Image (spheres, coloured by chain):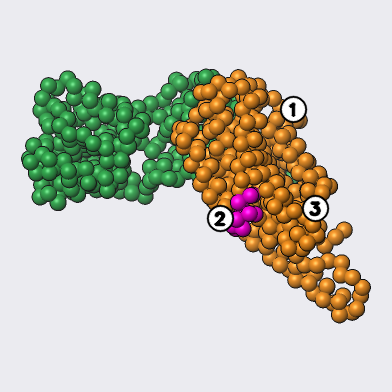
Chain colours: A orange, B green
C-alpha cells in the first residue's frame, strides 16, 4: 500500500458510498439492469477517458476528444450510407485517420513547443468544422450490421443487458490498465508527466512518447465515436459537445494529478461510473433539475483537487522530515 | 393481554385494508418524461404544463431535462425502464437513433408516447402514439380567419420562419392553401424573419418602405408571434396603427401577443399549445385501464384567439413562460 494509491482508494470508496446511498433511497438502483445501463450508457465516455488518462498523466491535455467523436459519427454515417463503404473497411479507416490526426497534434506540441491546450483546441475546431464539410444534418445509419451489433448483448438477471459497446469499453479499460502499468511505454508516460527534463536526461525520447500519447487519445476517441455511432445509430455534427470536459472530470475524480505524473486507468473508470451514477440518481428522482449533475461533479472535482494538494503537502513534509532526520534515501518525491 | 393483542391485530388489519383500498382507488401511475431541454419559452412552458396536467390526474411525472443532448435522453429512457415506470413520454431532440432504446422499452412492455415531435423509424410499433400539432393546419386556420375578416380581399405581406425549417414550410403551405380559393387575396411580399423579433421588425420596415409607406398593405401574416411583435413595432414607428390600418395574424399564442391584442395592436393568433402532455396522459390512462389503443397520431387543437379574450389569456399564461 502506497500513499500514491490513496486517491484511487478514495475514488472507489466514493463510488461505493454513492451507490449505497442511491440504493438505500431507490432499491431498484441495485439491479443488474442499472449496472448494465451504467456500462452501456457511459461506454463512449469511458473509452475516451482512458485516452485522456494517458494524456493527463503525460502532463498534457486533449480538448479535441468530443470533436473527434462527432467527426467519427458523421464520417461513418456518410461512409456507410452514401459512399457504400463496408463497416469492416470504414471502422479501421476512421481509427487510422484519428491516429494520424492525434500524432500530428502530438508532433506540433513537441516540435513547435506549443502548449497542448492550444494545439488540441485547434484540433477541436478542425475536427468539429470537418463534420460540417460532410453534412450538417443528423444522418441515420441504416446499415444492417448496426442492427446486428446493437442487438447483440448478454442477458443479465432481472432484464439487464451487457451490450456489445459495454464489452468494448471494459476491454479498452483492461488494455489501458495493462498498457499504463505494465509496459515500458506506460513507464515513459509517467516519467514524461513527472518531470519532462529528468525524463529526457534518463534517455526517454519525449517526442516519440508525446506523439504516441496523442495518437492513442485520438485513436480511442475514434473508437468512442464508433461506439457512439452504434449507440445512437446516427451521425450528427453537434454530437458529444463538451465530452472532453466530462472525460477530464472523470480523470481527475479518478485520482489522476492534473499536473501529470500520477494516475490510474481504474480510477478514471470509477470516475466515469460516479458521473453516470449521479445522472441515474437524478433521473430516478425525477424532480431535480439535470443541472445538478454538473453541480455535484463540480463539487467532487473541488474535493479531489483539495485532496491532492493535501497529499502533496503531507508527502513534502514527510520528505523534509526524513531529510532533516538524516535518513538515507527519500522514498517519495512530491510530483 | 389478549384484548390488547386482538385490538392491535384489528388496528393492523384496518390499516392494511386502508392501504389496499387507496391503492385500488388512485391511478397510481408513474410516468417518465424525457424532455429536450429548456431552450425556448415555449419549451419551458411545455414542461410546466406537463407537471400541472400530471398533478391534476394524480400521476407521478418524473421529468429529465436532457440539455439538448440525445445521449442524455437515451440514458434517461434507460433509467426510466430500470425504474419500472408505467409509461415513457419522449420529446425527441433529433428524429433518428431511437430504435435500440425504444426496443428495450417495448421489451419491458412500457408504452412510449412521443410529444411535440416525431421520429424516423422503420418500426412504428416502437411507440404507442405521437401527440403533435399540425403545422399545416395552423397556417390554414390563420388564412381562413383572414379571408373571413377581409371578405376575401386583401394584399398580404408574409414574414416567414427560418428558411427550410419544417414549421416555416408547413405554415406557409397551409396559409397558401386557405387563401388560394380567394382570387383577390394575394401575398405581395414574403421574406424570412428567422422567427426572431429583431428580424421581424427589420423585414417589416423594408416591406413598409417598398409598399408606399404601408398604404398598399392590408394585412401581415407572421409564422410566429415573436416576429409579429417586431413587425407591430415597425408599423407603429412608420406612423400607422397595427391592428386597424394593417391587420395582423400570427401563430404560437405566446403571452406577449395577448398583451398586444389587449392593447388593440394585434388581431389574432393561432395557438401552438404547450399542453402536449394532457392528451398523452389521457391516452395512457385509458390504455392502462382497459387496453384502449389510441390512434397513432393525436393532433392537438390549433385554436384561434381573438382580442376579446386576450386579457384573460394573458393572465393565464404569463406565469407559464
Q: Residue A111, percent across and down?
A: 63, 54
Taking the image as shown, residue A3 lies to the left or right of residue A226, namely right
Chain letter for the residue marked with disc 2 in the picture: A
Secondary structure beneath label 1: strand
Name the residue rendered at 60%, 55% in the picture. A112
Q: Residue A65, percent across and down?
A: 60, 45
Q: Nearer the viewer, residue A59 or B185?
A: A59
Q: Are marks 3 and 2 in contact (CB under 8 Å)?
A: no
Q: Are marks 1 and 2 in contact (CB under 8 Å)?
A: no
Q: Nearer the viewer, residue A58 or B8?
A: A58
Q: Earlier in the sequence, mark 1 or mark 2?
A: 2
Name the residue rendered at 73%, 34% in the picture. A167
Which residue is under mark 1?
A154
Instruction: Respond whether the residues carrying marks 3 and 1 are from the same subunit.
Output: yes
Chain letter for the residue marked with disc 1 in the picture: A
Name the residue rendered at 78%, 72% in the picture. A316
Q: Residues within 10 Å of mark 3 (few under 14, many from 20)?
A: some
Q: Nearer the viewer, residue A150 or A262?
A: A262
Q: Earlier in the sequence, mark 3 or mark 1?
A: 1
Name the residue rendered at 38%, 26% in the picture. B299
Up-down: is A301 above or below A246? below
Which residue is under mark 3?
A187
**Given this view, does label 3 or label 1 mark the residue nearer the observer?**
3
Q: CA distance from mark 3 to mark 2?
A: 26 Å
Which label was assigned to residue A252?
none
Q: Residues within 10 Å of mark 1 (few under 14, many from 20)?
A: few
Hey, which quadrant is residue B242 in on the image?
top left
Taking the image as shown, residue B265 lies to the left or right of residue A228, namely left
Hey, which quadrant is residue A10 in on the image?
bottom right
Q: Which residues are magenta?
A: A106-117
Instruction: Respond whether the residues carrying marks 3 and 2 are from the same subunit.
Output: yes
Which residue is under mark 2?
A118
Amino acid at each position: 500500500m502506497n500513499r500514491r494509491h490513496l486517491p484511487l482508494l478514495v475514488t472507489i470508496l466514493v463510488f461505493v458510498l454513492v451507490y449505497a446511498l442511491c440504493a438505500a433511497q431507490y432499491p431498484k438502483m441495485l439491479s443488474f439492469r442499472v449496472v448494465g445501463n451504467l456500462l452501456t450508457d457511459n461506454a463512449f465516455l469511458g473509452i475516451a477517458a482512458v485516452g485522456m488518462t494517458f494524456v493527463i498523466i503525460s502532463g498534457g491535455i486533449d480538448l479535441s476528444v468530443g470533436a473527434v467523436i462527432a467527426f467519427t459519427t458523421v464520417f461513418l454515417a456518410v461512409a456507410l450510407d452514401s459512399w457504400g463503404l463496408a463497416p469492416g473497411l470504414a471502422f479501421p479507416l476512421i481509427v487510422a485517420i484519428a491516429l494520424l490526426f492525434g500524432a500530428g497534434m502530438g508532433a506540433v506540441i513537441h516540435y513547435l513547443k506549443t502548449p497542448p491546450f492550444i494545439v488540441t483546441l485547434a484540433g477541436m475546431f478542425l475536427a468539429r468544422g470537418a463534420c460540417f464539410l460532410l453534412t450538417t444534418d443528423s444522418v441515420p445509419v441504416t446499415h444492417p450490421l448496426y442492427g446486428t451489433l446493437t442487438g447483440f448483448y448478454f442477458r443479465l438477471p432481472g432484464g439487464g443487458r451487457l451490450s456489445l459497446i459495454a464489452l468494448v469499453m471494459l476491454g479498452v479499460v483492461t488494455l489501458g490498465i495493462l498498457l499504463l502499468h505494465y509496459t515500458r511505454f506506460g513507464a515513459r508516460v509517467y516519467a514524461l508527466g513527472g518531470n519532462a527534463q529528468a525524463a529526457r536526461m534518463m534517455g526517454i525520447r519525449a517526442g516519440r512518447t508525446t506523439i504516441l500519447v496523442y495518437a492513442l487519445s485520438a485513436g480511442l476517441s475514434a473508437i468512442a465515436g464508433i461506439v457512439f455511432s452504434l449507440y445512437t445509430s446516427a451521425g450528427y455534427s453537434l454530437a458529444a459537445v463538451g465530452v472532453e470536459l466530462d472525460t477530464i472530470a472523470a480523470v481527475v475524480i479518478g485520482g489522476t494529478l492534473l499536473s501529470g505524473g500520477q494516475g490510474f486507468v481504474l480510477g478514471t473508470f470509477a470516475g466515469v461510473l460516479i458521473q453516470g451514477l449521479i445522472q441515474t440518481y437524478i433521473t430516478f428522482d425525477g424532480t431535480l433539475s439535470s443541472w445538478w449533475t454538473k453541480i455535484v461533479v463540480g463539487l467532487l472535482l473541488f474535493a479531489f483537487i483539495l485532496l491532492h494538494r493535501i497529499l502533496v503537502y503531507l508527502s513534502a513534509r514527510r520528505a523534509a522530515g526524513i531529510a532533516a532526520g538524516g535518513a538515507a534515501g527519500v522514498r517519495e518525491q512530491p510530483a | 393481554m389478549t384484548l390488547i393483542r386482538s385490538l392491535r391485530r384489528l388496528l393492523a388489519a384496518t390499516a392494511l385494508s386502508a392501504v389496499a383500498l387507496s391503492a385500488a382507488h388512485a391511478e397510481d401511475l408513474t410516468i417518465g418524461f424525457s424532455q429536450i431541454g429548456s431552450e425556448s419559452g415555449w419549451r419551458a412552458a411545455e414542461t410546466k404544463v406537463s407537471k400541472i396536467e400530471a398533478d391534476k390526474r394524480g400521476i407521478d411525472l418524473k421529468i429529465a431535462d436532457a440539455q439538448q443532448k440525445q445521449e442524455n435522453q437515451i440514458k434517461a429512457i434507460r433509467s426510466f425502464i430500470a425504474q419500472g415506470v408505467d409509461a415513457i413520454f419522449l420529446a425527441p431532440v433529433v428524429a433518428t437513433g431511437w430504435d435500440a432504446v425504444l426496443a428495450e422499452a417495448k421489451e419491458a412492455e412500457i408504452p412510449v408516447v412521443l410529444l411535440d415531435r416525431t421520429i424516423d423509424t422503420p418500426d412504428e410499433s416502437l411507440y404507442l402514439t405521437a401527440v403533435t400539432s399540425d403545422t399545416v393546419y395552423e397556417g390554414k386556420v390563420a388564412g381562413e380567419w383572414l379571408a373571413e375578416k377581409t371578405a376575401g380581399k386583401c394584399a398580404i405581406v408574409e414574414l416567414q420562419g427560418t428558411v427550410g425549417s419544417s414549421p416555416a414550410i408547413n405554415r406557409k403551405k397551409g396559409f397558401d392553401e386557405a387563401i388560394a380559393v380567394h382570387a383577390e387575396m394575394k401575398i405581395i411580399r414574403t421574406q424570412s424573419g428567422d422567427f426572431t423579433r429583431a428580424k421581424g421588425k427589420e423585414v417589416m420596415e423594408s416591406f413598409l418602405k417598398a409598399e408606399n409607406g404601408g398604404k398598399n398593405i392590408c394585412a401581415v401574416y407572421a409564422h410566429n408571434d415573436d416576429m409579429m411583435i417586431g413587425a407591430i413595432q415597425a408599423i407603429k414607428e412608420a406612423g400607422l396603427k397595427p391592428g386597424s390600418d394593417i391587420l395582423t395574424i400570427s401563430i404560437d399564442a405566446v403571452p406577449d401577443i395577448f398583451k398586444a391584442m389587449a392593447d388593440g395592436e394585434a388581431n389574432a393568433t393561432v395557438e401552438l399549445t404547450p399542453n402536449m402532455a394532457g392528451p398523452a396522459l389521457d391516452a395512457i390512462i385509458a390504455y392502462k385501464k382497459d387496453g384502449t389503443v389510441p390512434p397513432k397520431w393525436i393532433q392537438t387543437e390549433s385554436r384561434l384567439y381573438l382580442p376579446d379574450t386576450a386579457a384573460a389569456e394573458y393572465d393565464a399564461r404569463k406565469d407559464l413562460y
